[in-house]
Amino acid sequence: MRTPFVVGNWKLHKTIAESLALVTELKNALGALKGVQVGVAPTFVSINPVAKRLEDSAIATCAQDCHWETHGPWTGEVSPELLADAGVSWIIVGHSERRQFLGDSNEVVGKKVPAVLAKNIGAIVCCGEMLADRDGGRMLEVVDAQLGAALANVDAAAASKLVIAYEPVWAIGTGRTATPAQAQEVHKHIRSRLAGKLGQAAADSIRIQYGGSVKPANAEALISEPDIDGFLVGGASLEAADFIAIVKAARPS
Ligand code: 13P
């Protein structure tokens, strides 16, 4: 019922030339693939060249972040509107690296999400607990607080433009993936929270991606869980062969 959605978050990697080389490979390998939606999130400087290269392809160009205002005295910032103009159709909001190191509090994320949706751009809203939260049994509380703030001003009409990415911080870039059962437990909880906030029909339609050390070797087991609807892939999205294998694993059989 939900088309799986796999996005490569390239973080701070790849020159324009390297970005173009990678998307050209992805386009050739995945351009005709059915049953799964694919996106890549390059750095801001590579977005427009990548979007142009992907113009005649179903692969979406995504951004890794944005500001909440459309324009104004915000040195260094980029707005959803400018990203759409550059060719972006989805924006990642509230990634844990931004939350931990770059000032994206729950409040900031709560301003960015409606700003993205207001421009008719898709929002990939990230949440996930730190290791201490999991060890302390607080993971669901943390995720609830993050999503509560992120979705405070979002209603069910936005469901088709909303994706949630559950990324436990202890699994990001560590090689330590959540087990399928650990991820499923949180994904199921998130879907029940979405149902409470947006209604069951909206909750059933919203894709919930898993992120955190997703690799070709673990993608299939993760995607077979009922509430895992795709992936937000970091390290393994930088190599065409690995990313292609993950996308193919996410395709319904
Ligand atoms: P890794 O796949 O490198 O663990 O990164 C996950 C992530 O943060 C994607 O947004």
Image: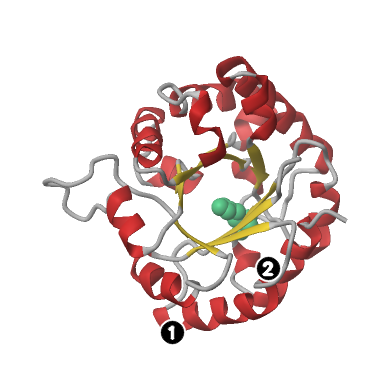
Which residue is more in the foreground, 15 or 114?
A: 114
Q: 93 left or right of 77?
A: right
Left or right: where does residue 49 sit relative to residue 25?
Answer: left
Q: Amino acid at mark 1?
A: Ala
Q: Quadrant of the N terminus?
A: top right
Quarter of the image with the C terminus in it: bottom right
Mark 1 vs ligand 1: CB below 8 Å: no
Q: Which of the two labelled residues, at mark 1 and mark 2, occupies the earlier sequence position?
A: 1
Tell me which corner region of the image, top left, top right, bottom left or bottom right, holds residue 216: bottom right
Residue at the image position 53 percent from the left and 25 percent from the top: 156
Q: Nearer the viewer, residue 192 or 161?
A: 161
Q: Residue at x 28, y 49 (%)?
A: 79
Say which mark, if any, is on residue 238. Answer: none
Q: Is residue 249 left or right of residue 205?
A: right
Q: Which mark is residue 243?
A: 2
Q: Determine whether the residue tagged by mark 1 lies in a helix, strand or loop.
A: helix
Q: Residues within 10 Å of mark 2 (few under 14, many from 20)?
A: many
Which structural element holds mark 2?
helix
Is residue 143 placed above or below 104 in the rendered structure? above
The quarter of the picture showing ligand 1: bottom right
x and y percentages locating residue 58 in the rendered image:
58, 65
Residue 20: percent from left, percent from top: 48, 80
Residue at image coords 60%, 20% = 141
Spot occupied by residue 208 in the image (x, y as percentages of width and height) = 65, 39
Residue 136 makes an appearance in the image: no
The residue indicated by pointer 1 is 17
- CB-based contact (under 8 Å), mark 1 and mark 2: no
* Horizontal and vertical percent position of residue 215: 74, 61
Query: As shown in the figure, which amino acid type bears the numbered disc 2?
Result: Phe
